[in-house]
Image: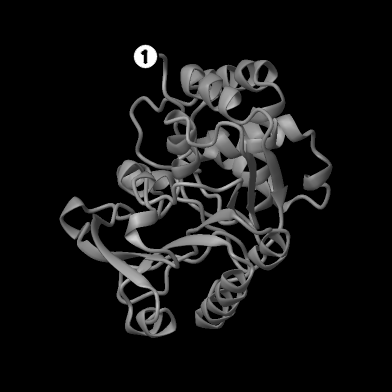
């Protein structure tokens, strides 16, 4: 068997450890795959590896413009990306990290070449504290440098596999409401929104300067009802928060226990109760 595609960045709330389990819950028959909360794309890569997406149109999107730009650059061509990541790897130290982190404070940041922005994004992801992506109210990346002895800044094999997996995929930067407007009948949508906080280390919503609060979850639940009427299959990952359970009480809910991994102290990486919500019956699973 050849190399498997997998996320090329670490992402808070990523589904890498449970991607195989989620893949078992995908409906049998659908014509398009939509993932509007892309993050690291763990489920997309797993479905690609299993051949489940073969012959299907795939639409990936996220509201985080830097994440989407990185995916688009990896899709288009990775040689310049890899070459520059190797250069950054040689120059990596504390002063260099904070210099690169400061780029988004510049007024002309978004005029920087997309490849260089993607290099910055991946470099910071590989070298920042615990691979955490967080921005402040101005949208500036503000995570301190991590204590990595030898960070793997340029993972060529993973980038090459991701490049292959992303061929023919539509990748867009937009919020979930716009992304879900385009979903047609007999499509399958995987939803992985930022979780509603239920405690001191179970919930994280600072992926963009626009926070994803309970009102956003209410809006998503309403859209899910609209998808029902369009004969769309959807599956959603979320947390077993009473408010979330209430929003989706008429749907199928499966409990999944998962370690929370964004915490510097391993002893505080508590088990949190995650749920998977589907609008289709178990018999429709693969």
Task: Please tell me which residue is depicted at 77% across the width and 46% down the height of the picture.
Answer: 109
Q: Is residue 5 above or below residue 251?
A: above
Q: Badge 1: few (under 14), some or many (20 or more) residues near its Cα, within 10 Å?
A: few
Q: Residue at x 65, y 58 (%)?
A: 63
Marker count (numbered)? 1
- Left/right placement of residue 118 relative to residue 274 reads right
Residue 64, given in percent of the width and then of the height, sits at 64, 54
Is residue 126 in view? Answer: no
Q: How is the image coloured?
A: one colour
The quarter of the image holding the C terminus is top left
Residue 49 drawn above or below residue 1: below
- Considering every residue shown, the one lying at the far left of the view is 267
Residue 199 drawn above or below residue 18: below
Residue 113, percent from left and from top: 79, 33
Q: Which residue is mark 1?
A: 1
* Image coordinates for residue 92, horizontal then vertical, percent: 51, 27
Residue 167 or residue 163, whichever sits in front: 167
Q: Is residue 85 left or right of residue 255?
A: right
97 in relation to 245, above or below: above
Tell which of 241 and 26 is nearer to you. 26
Question: SS for tag 1?
Answer: loop
Q: Can residue 260 be seen in this snapshot? A: yes
Tell whether 184 sits left or right of 126.
right
**Residue 278: quarter of image:** bottom left
Identify the residue at image location x=30%, y=73%. Answer: 240
The N terminus sits in image quarter: top left
Where residue 132 appears, x then y in whole percent?
Answer: 44, 50
* Residue located 38% across and 44% down the image: 23
């Amino acid at each position: 068997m050849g190399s498997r595609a997998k996320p090329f960045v670490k992402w808070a709330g990523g589904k890498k450890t449970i991607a195989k389990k989620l893949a078992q819950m995908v409906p049998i028959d659908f014509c398009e795959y939509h993932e509007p909360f892309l993050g690291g794309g763990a489920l997309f890569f797993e479905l690609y590896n299993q051949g489940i997406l073969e012959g299907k149109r795939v639409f990936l999107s996220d509201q985080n413009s830097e994440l989407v730009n990185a995916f688009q650059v990896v899709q288009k061509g990775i040689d310049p990306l890899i070459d520059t990541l190797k250069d950054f790897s040689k120059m990596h130290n504390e002063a260099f990290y904070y210099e690169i982190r400061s780029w988004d404070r510049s007024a002309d940041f978004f005029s920087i070449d997309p490849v260089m922005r993607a290099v910055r994004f991946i470099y910071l992801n590989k070298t920042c504290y615990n691979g955490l992506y967080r921005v402040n109210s101005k949208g500036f990346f503000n995570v301190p440098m991590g204590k990595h002895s030898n960070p793997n800044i340029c993972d060529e094999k993973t980038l090459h596999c991701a490049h292959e997996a992303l061929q023919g995929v539509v990748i867009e930067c937009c919020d979930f409401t716009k992304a879900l407007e385009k979903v047609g009948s007999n499509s399958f949508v995987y939803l992985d929104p930022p979780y509603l906080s239920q405690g001191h280390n179970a919930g994280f919503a600072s992926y963009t300067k626009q926070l994803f609060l309970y009102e956003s979850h209410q809006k998503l639940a309403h859209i899910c009802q609209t998808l029902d009427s369009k004969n769309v299959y959807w599956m959603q990952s979320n947390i077993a928060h009473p408010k979330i359970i209430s929003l989706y009480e008429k749907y199928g809910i499966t409990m999944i226990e998962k370690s929370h991994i964004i915490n510097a102290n391993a002893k505080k990486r508590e088990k949190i109760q995650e749920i998977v919500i589907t609008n289709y019956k178990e018999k429709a699973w693969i």
